[in-house]
Amino acid sequence: MQYLLLNPIAFSIGPIAVHWYGIILGTAALVGLLLAIREGKRFGIPQDFFMDLLLLGVPSSIIAARIYYVAFMWDEYKNNLWDVFKIWNGGIAIYGALIGAVICAIIFVRKKGYSFWRIADICAPGLLIGQMIGRWGNFVNQEAYGGPAEESFLRNTLHLPNFIVNQMNVQGVFHHPAFLYESVWSFIGILILFVLRRQKFLRAGELFMSYFIWYSIGRFFIEGLRTDSLAFIGSEWLVSIMNFLWAPMELVFEPGYLDPAYGNVRISQLLAILIIIAAVIIIVVRRVKGYSNVAYSAPIVSTKGNAVQEVAAGQAATAESTTEYPQKSDSTDDQADKKGSLS
């Protein structure tokens, strides 16, 4: 049994309890939306488009995230099916959420006549800032923490405030605030994406892939600290690779305990490696094949009826980019975007 120092319930309305976890996730989604809307204005994309995308994407993400988590923790839920729906108690897997969000976005964006890659690039910083804020929901629920840590390390080395240090005291043992490490990593990533998206060499889809690369690098190393990782029993050669890649962390940290009877390969670590490899391959192949010949700063064209207004707005907002990259005809750019979105 874990002893929470913070009350996970923010307030109650009659019999309905409103949890901090839900408030924090809602705030994360809202801030991510505002960030996407602001960048979308540069390309003449109406804010209603992003609001509709959020209204569809959030439930899709939550459902996929919960399915992902429950699938790997089925033994704990098979006899308590009602607990599957209690997402306010935690158990939302980020990689599952990303799967749900991407599937929803592909369908919605294509229906609206946009290139998926162009919209994904605009949303990438918003996704990262959402994850940065959302991790504090784990803090309130006192979950997703790392292995044991000395109190002096938290107070004197990391100089963490008392409210964080105290919340990391689980049943009398202090733990690494893995949620905080990931939140800080995401914040740094947001700054990097802000810089990248102003670079003239950046092509369509590459900011989105950069988001996956950055987040997955941090997730791989931070996941190794956690004691609640989803895992499976893998081959010895796979275990050796995972341990070898995580070895630099052992100079400062000890890996979080993972019950060998439950698994010896952390699923999130393996996914992180696969995603990094896949993202790099996608960037290279799209460059080589010419699918990414459209610059990030080029106007975004829709195949629907409002394309003319959006192109005009986009050209006004990206006049500098059109000087560096001479624009093709609308039909040529649109065909390039369509080809790229299917690669």
Image (cartoon, rainbow, N blue to C red):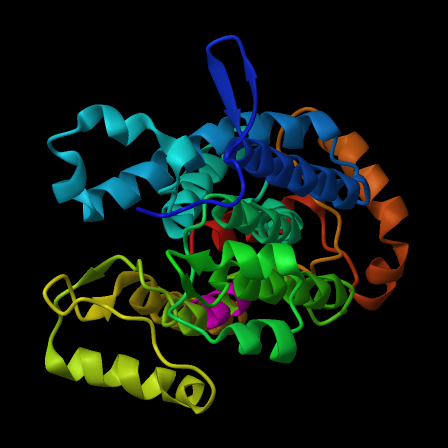
236 to the left or right of 339: left
Residue in the image at 33% along x and 62% along y: 268
328 to the left or right of 73: right
259 to the left or right of 323: left
Query: Residue 53's quadrant in the figure?
Result: top right
Residue in the image at 45% along x and 33% along y: 107
Q: Position of residue 301 (x, y in %)?
A: 68, 41
Residue in the image at 31% along x and 88% along y: 244
- Residue 335 in sight: no
Q: Position of residue 10 (x, y in %)?
A: 58, 29
Q: Is residue 64 above or below residue 126?
A: above
For the C terminus, which image quadrant?
Answer: bottom left
Most prominent secondary structure in the magenta stretch? helix
- Residue 338 in sight: yes
Depth order, front residue of 151/200: 151
Q: Position of residue 120 (x, y in %)?
A: 58, 48
Q: Which residues are magenta?
A: 214-219
Q: Position of residue 100 (x, y in %)?
A: 40, 40
Query: Residue 77's quadrant in the figure?
Result: top left
Residue in the image at 76% along x and 67% along y: 195
Q: Is residue 26 above or below residue 147?
A: above
Is 218 contained in the magenta span?
yes
Is 298 contained in the magenta span?
no
Depth order, front residue of 193/147: 147
Q: Is residue 267 above or below residue 333?
A: below
